[in-house]
Amino acid sequence: MTMKSEVHTVSTSAVKIIDAAIQTRTIYFHVDSSHTIFLGGPDLTAANGLQINKGTSQTIVLPANEELWAVSDSVDQPFGILYQAD
């Protein structure tokens, strides 16, 4: 397996940022945008997601067979991720 880094840009509609995999993965986030990013599942909204504040970093563990989605409370908000890919 290899490490993969990506930059995503999200808006007010949730988008899938990581597909499900057969293994548990640790994912590192850094939010450079001017607004907060929220993480969760396919039913994600800014009201029910895990909040990652602007200018901060966060590490989460994504269980096997789970997808990860992101959304923001504003348009065109970038953030970076680093994770172990298949």
Image: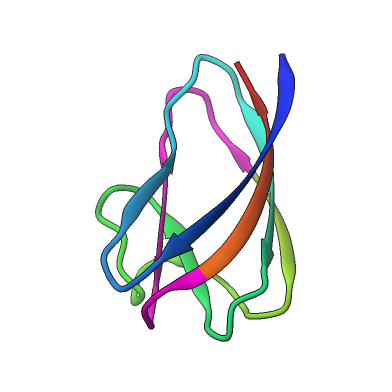
Residue 6: horizontal and vertical position, in percent?
61, 45
Quarter of the image that includes the C terminus: top right
Q: Left or right: 83 with respect to 20?
A: right
Query: For the magenta stretch, what is the residue range?
Result: 61-77
Quadrant of image for the N terminus: top right
Is the residue 74 above or below the residue 70 in the image? below
Q: Residue at x 47, y 67 (%)?
A: 38
Q: Quadrant of residue 83?
A: top right
The image shows residue 3 at horizontal and vertical percentages of 74, 28
Q: Residue at x 25, y 54 (%)?
A: 43
Query: Residue shown at 64%/80% (left/top)?
Result: 54
How far from the left and from the top, in percent, is residue 14?
A: 30, 59
- Left or right: residue 34 compared with residue 42: right
Q: Is residue 74 magenta?
A: yes
Taking depth in this image into account, of 28 and 11 the one nearest to the observer is 11
Relative to 47, is 64 on the left or the right?
right
Give the image's coloring scheme: rainbow
Tell me: residue 50, above or below residue 53.
Answer: above
